[in-house]
């Protein structure tokens, strides 16, 4: 994996942490997620007329990805309702790359080097270590169940998109269509169920939602492009270093305390990122 690809994926991880911080800061997490997704859809719609569309062979994968990601948003909300984000997020994001690595060989024929496998193991171990360092206050079992189920969903759409984006011949267009369809689905659901909340939230949160939409669009778009340049499992693991940026944001802007256990887990993740570069 070239240094430029590593740098781009790390930047995508920073963007991912940033838009998640915007969602976390919202009073209604699911409403903020819908607004961010809708903003990404609007930005994508503005771009589609100027780029070539994805190849026909990629459309079944695109449709499957949209369904999986709508399930992802639902499970994400359920996990955060059941317990702490500091418990659910690392477990979801830490387990998914390991599942991708295990599935990528039989499904898409990608064989990783021993160094890359060690890197994936480090990153996953570090993130799961963050979960055990977190002091969840309630419903730990339910939160864990939702988080692990969502890790399977994350792994599924990562593999689906890893194949689909390669078949598309147009990574940018493939990404834009994902966000258009996702944003439209979530927006219509909220419009039918909670129209007053949607209108009030859009008026109050549009600057942050627009910034978050641009962040999530760029983050996933860069990650999908990287999957055309390097193994899907390696990109998936490296992208999950977003937790490092999320913790930095929490410490600097939210004044959250970083414990010794968390610091050790972060060091393991950093070691995994270095190994991924070496591999």
Image (cartoon, rainbow, N blue to C red):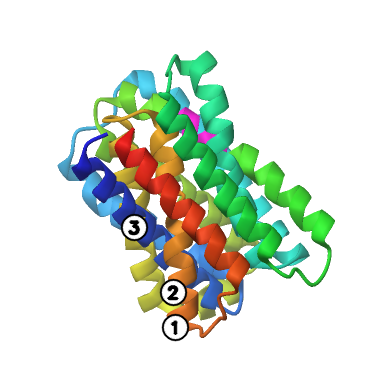
Residue visible at 48% across and 65% down in the picture = 20
Give x and y (percent) for residue 148. Answer: 70, 45
Q: Is residue 66 left or right of residue 84?
A: left
Residue 165: name its quadrant.
Answer: top left
Mark 3 or mark 1: which is in front? Answer: 1
Q: Are marks 1 and 2 in contact (CB under 8 Å)?
A: yes
- The residue indicated by pointer 2 is 249
Q: Nearer the viewer, residue 243 or 274?
A: 274
Which residue is denoted by mark 3 in the rendering?
Answer: 42
Secondary structure, mark 1, is helix
Which of the two residues, 222 or 70, is positioned nearer the viewer here? 222
Does dot 2 land on a helix, a strand or a loop? Answer: helix
Q: Is residue 159 magenta?
A: yes
Tell me if I can see residue 177 in this picture: no
> Residues under labels 1 and 2: Cα distance?
6 Å
- Using residue 73 as the reference point, say whether residue 215 is left or right of it: left
Residue interval drawn in magenta: 154-161
Q: Rounded to the nearest whole Å, what is the CA distance between mark 3 and mark 2?
A: 27 Å
Closer to the chain start, of discs 3 and 1, is: 3
């Amino acid at each position: 994996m070239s240094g430029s690809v590593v740098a781009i994926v790390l930047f995508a991880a920073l963007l991912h942490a940033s838009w998640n911080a915007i969602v976390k800061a919202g009073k209604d997490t699911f409403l903020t997620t819908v607004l961010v997704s809708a903003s990404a859809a609007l930005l994508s719609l503005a771009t589609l007329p100027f780029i070539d569309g994805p190849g026909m062979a990629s459309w079944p994968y695109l449709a499957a990805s949209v369904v999986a990601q709508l399930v992802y948003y639902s499970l994400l909300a359920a996990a955060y309702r059941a317990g702490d984000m500091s418990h659910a997020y690392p477990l979801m994001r830490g387990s998914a790359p390991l599942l991708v690595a295990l599935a990528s060989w039989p499904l898409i024929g990608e064989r990783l080097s021993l160094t890359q496998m060690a890197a994936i193991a480090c990153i996953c171990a570090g993130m799961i270590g963050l979960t055990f360092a977190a002091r969840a206050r309630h419903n730990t079992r339910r939160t864990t169940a939702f988080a692990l189920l969502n890790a399977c969903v994350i792994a599924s759409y990562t593999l689906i998109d890893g194949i689909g984006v390669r078949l598309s011949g147009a990574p940018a267009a493939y990404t834009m269509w994902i966000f258009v369809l996702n944003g439209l689905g979530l927006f219509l659901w909220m419009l039918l169920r909670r129209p007053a909340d949607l209108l009030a939230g859009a008026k109050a949160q549009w600057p942050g939602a627009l910034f978050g939409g641009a962040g999530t669009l760029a983050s996933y778009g860069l990650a999908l492009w990287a999957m055309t340049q390097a193994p899907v499992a390696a990109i998936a693991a490296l992208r999950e270093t977003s937790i490092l940026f999320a913790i930095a944001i929490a410490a600097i802007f939210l004044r959250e305390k970083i414990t010794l256990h968390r610091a050790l887990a972060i060091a393991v993740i950093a070691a995994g990122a270095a190994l991924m570069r070496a591999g």
